[in-house]
Amino acid sequence: MSGSDAPEWYMVQGFSVHNEVANMVECGLSNFDALKTSTVNPCTYMGIIDRKGTVATGKDADLLLLDKNPLEDISNTKTINGVFRYGKYYSRRDLDEMLQQVLEAKAKL
């Protein structure tokens, strides 16, 4: 399972998972299997695969909308166009605004 959200100096939660999944491909996993390390596998392990981890009718709508296919190139996981989280849609613009707010708040610390 992927899990680079541990508090490390040079790992930024949410961003570093892209590198971790790419590293799994470099180590020999297929793009499909590497993607499963952040989707199906954790949900199976946590016992919530009936609600999350795959796209299916009746499951929670938590997913990324990408501009490019990560099965063709794993770095395409970074081409995020939008996010569904808890059934709410966030556009690329929404995501950029949230990131800017976080950066501004951090700069004030």
Image (cartoon, rainbow, N blue to C red):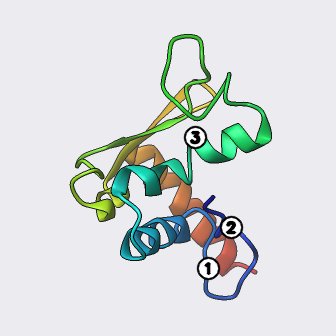
Residue 24 screen position, x and y as percent: 46, 69
Quadrant the N terminus occupies = bottom right
| Marks 2/3: CA–CA distance | 17 Å
Q: Is residue 34 above or below residue 63?
A: below
Neighbour tally class for label 3: few under 14, some 14-19, many 20 plus, Cα within 10 Å: some
Q: Which residue is mark 2?
A: 5
Q: Residue at x 70, y 78 (%)?
A: 108
Residue 103 screen position, x and y as percent: 58, 71
- Is tag 3's residue or tag 1's residue first in the polypeptide sequence? 1
- Who is closer to the viewer here, 98 or 37? 37
Q: Residue at x 68, y 75 (%)?
A: 106
Left or right of residue 18: residue 67: left
- The circle on residue 11 is 1
Q: Secondary structure at mark 3?
A: helix
- Is tag 2's residue or tag 3's residue first in the polypeptide sequence? 2
| Marks 3/1: CA–CA distance | 23 Å
- Is tag 1's residue or tag 2's residue first in the polypeptide sequence? 2
- The circle on residue 58 is none
Residue 9 screen position, x and y as percent: 69, 88
- Quarter occupied by residue 25: bottom left
Neighbour tally class for label 2: few under 14, some 14-19, many 20 plus, Cα within 10 Å: few
Q: Which residue is mark 3?
A: 40
Q: Residue at x 59, y 11 (%)?
A: 58
> Which amino acid, by three-letter code, is at mark 2?
Asp
Check if mark 2's residue and mark 3's residue have beta carbons within 8 Å. Answer: no
Q: Residue at x 57, y 40 (%)?
A: 40
Left or right of residue 45: residue 31: left
> Which amino acid, by three-letter code, is at mark 3?
Val
Check if mark 1's residue and mark 2's residue have beta carbons within 8 Å. Answer: yes
